[in-house]
Amino acid sequence: MSERENLITVRDLTKTYQTGSVEVFALKAISLTINKGEFVAIMGASGSGKSTFMNIIGCLDNPTSGEYLMEGKDVLTRDKDELAELRNSKLGFVFQSFNLLPRTSAQENVELPLLYNNKVEAAVREHKAIEALTSVGLADRLGAMPNELSGGQQQRVAIARALVNAPLVIMADEPTGNLDSKTSYEIMGIFQKLNDEGITIVMVTHEPDIAQFAKSNIVFKDGKIIANHPVTDRKIAMEELKKIATLTDENSTT
Amino acid sequence: MKFFNLFRIAYRSLNRNKLRSFLTMLGIIIGVASVIAMLAIGEGSNQTIQKSIASLGTNSIYIFPGTNANGGVRGGAGSNQTLKLEDADAIAAHCDLVKYVTPLVQRKSQIIFGAKNWNTMIIGIRNDYMLIRSLSIIKGSGFTEPDQRSAAKVCLVGVTVVFNLFGDENYNPIGEIIRINSIPVKIIGVLSKMGQNTFGQDQDDIVLAPFYTVQKRMMISTDHIGSILASGKSELQVVDAVDQITSLLREKHKIAPSDDIDFTVRTQSELSNIFGSITKVMTILLASIAGISLLVGGIGIMNIMLVSVTERTREIGIRMAIGAKGRDVLFQFVIESILISVVGGVIGIVVGILVAEMVATFGGWPVVITPLSIILSFGFSSAIGLFFGWYPARKAAALNPIDALRYE
């Protein structure tokens, strides 16, 4: 039953931007429900409104009108500080450009959300950060600075940072946009593992093959949802990575 | 715990930009150091002046003849001869708050020994003079009461006089006869070296003789005396002693209560107050110059913080996305700026003390570092950190998370 529990519910979500005298509709009355344990890929061309939608459900941006409930509770009536607390404890963000703090070690980057969380004692902070980095396979790069890490490793630090406060949802905005396909698959592998552990994942992507790793796909066009369907032939990252490994092996032998 | 976290965040952030943090700090370091050094130099000269004034005797009272008004034309202080020996005797007899009193007569005279001569100040004194001025005799002895009564032809000389008449400061001139205004006078003692006074006068260029010796044998007029020097029983009673002397002399000189007095009474503390206020002006001048450099340092902090808010907009966006509240960002920036100014302040205090010590060691200038100057400059630099950090921090805290994140 908990599998089907509503996590995110939006009704008639509308966002308009004022460009000179022209009103531009970024989102036109979106209504959607995302359940706990889902892995949703949001697709669409640029300008389709998918990122705007993501920013709004990630509490980074406000809609012009509409309703947004998280775990059945209203989100839009909360003030800035309450939204910050919500982002800190319930949401984890992964961005296309990683957005790690420069000249700050992997471990310190991951500790950052804990520093803004009053409930986390100083004593457990380091332990939690190391645990999160270990879960993304970076246990040996704790002290590395972002510029010493590859793109895939930086994105994994970002995922560890999103994970460290044990969020309900991970919001990923084009997480593989700056990565090659093999690294992308590795990131998808991490997402699938986290999803299996019960974390809901909402991911924006414009790459159809990346969307195949999700459980369901939502397609945006011109600020509206034009398709919302489960993924039929879902890709499993571990298997895809094996295929790539075999291909490289064949190439090297011939 | 929350505050400690923000402190840690601010510290890490400063640590990431060591060079920039240090350069920002430099303004505060120089500002605080100059405030400390300037105040130390000012206070040092103040105390030196006070000390040399105090060496004249802190409870001394000077009584000078008053001004002379003749047909509307007024002379300066001392232009009239209004003091007489009996005034000094009356003070000694009637003023119970006065401990010692001596009449003084003095004149510049040519003194001769053998082929050498020298022009110096001859002062006729009573023996109380030695006690009021705390003078001591290194060779020979002072005047006896018979010397005083009989206007004996004896004198005490300062070391400068010894040097100029005998060619050597350490020469023992006891028993030598010198001529003052053609009067042969025997040297019976040498005064211990006093050095220069506050005003740069050589206090050793002096010849002391019994009061009557000078008044009767060397002065043209024998009616009046130059001035009277007295001392109060204690420093606290000096003001009351002055009142006693004033009313006594008013009575003796038969001056109506409505008229101006024909003499002037000055105390040592008045003198030291005058010089105190001069050095205070100098100290304020130095401190305000230093204060301006502290202010410039503060503006440096604001400049860097403003630049860094713009430069770190994206970082602020990231922090907000992962849960930093507006006030977390506000405090982070304020703490960063306070850390810069406090650490800069501490370094500045150390540098300031070193500079002051160097001025003392190599420049030979007296310096006194007061705790007040340290507290003052440290408090001021912290306040500057808070004041100049607040505006950029407010700017950072007011950013919208999504705008900050999108900032390129």
Image (cartoon, coloured by chain):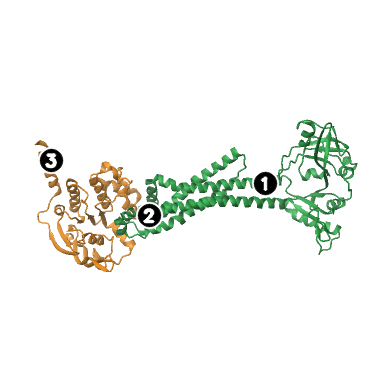
Chain colours: A orange, B green
Identified by mark 2, the residue type is Val
Secondary structure category for the residue under label 2 = helix
Secondary structure category for the residue under label 3 = helix
In the rendered image, residue B124, in percent from the top left (x then y), is placed at 84, 44
**Residue B274 relative to residue A254: left or right:** right
> A220 or B8, which is in the foreground?
A220
Q: Is residue B346 above or below residue B406?
A: above
Q: Is residue B405 above or below residue A242?
A: below
Q: Using the image, name the chain to which the residue with label 3 belongs.
A: A
Contact? badges 3 and 1 (CB < 8 Å): no
Q: Are marks 3 and 1 on the same chain?
A: no
Secondary structure category for the residue under label 1 = helix
Q: Are marks 2 and 3 on the same chain?
A: no
- The tag on residue B63 is none
Identified by mark 1, the residue type is Ile
What residue did someone put label 3 on? A248
> A156 or A51, which is in the foreground?
A51
Cα distance between the residues tagged 2 and 3: 47 Å
What residue did someone put label 1 on? B49
What residue did someone put label 2 on? B309
Q: Residue at x 29, y 56 (%)?
A: B406
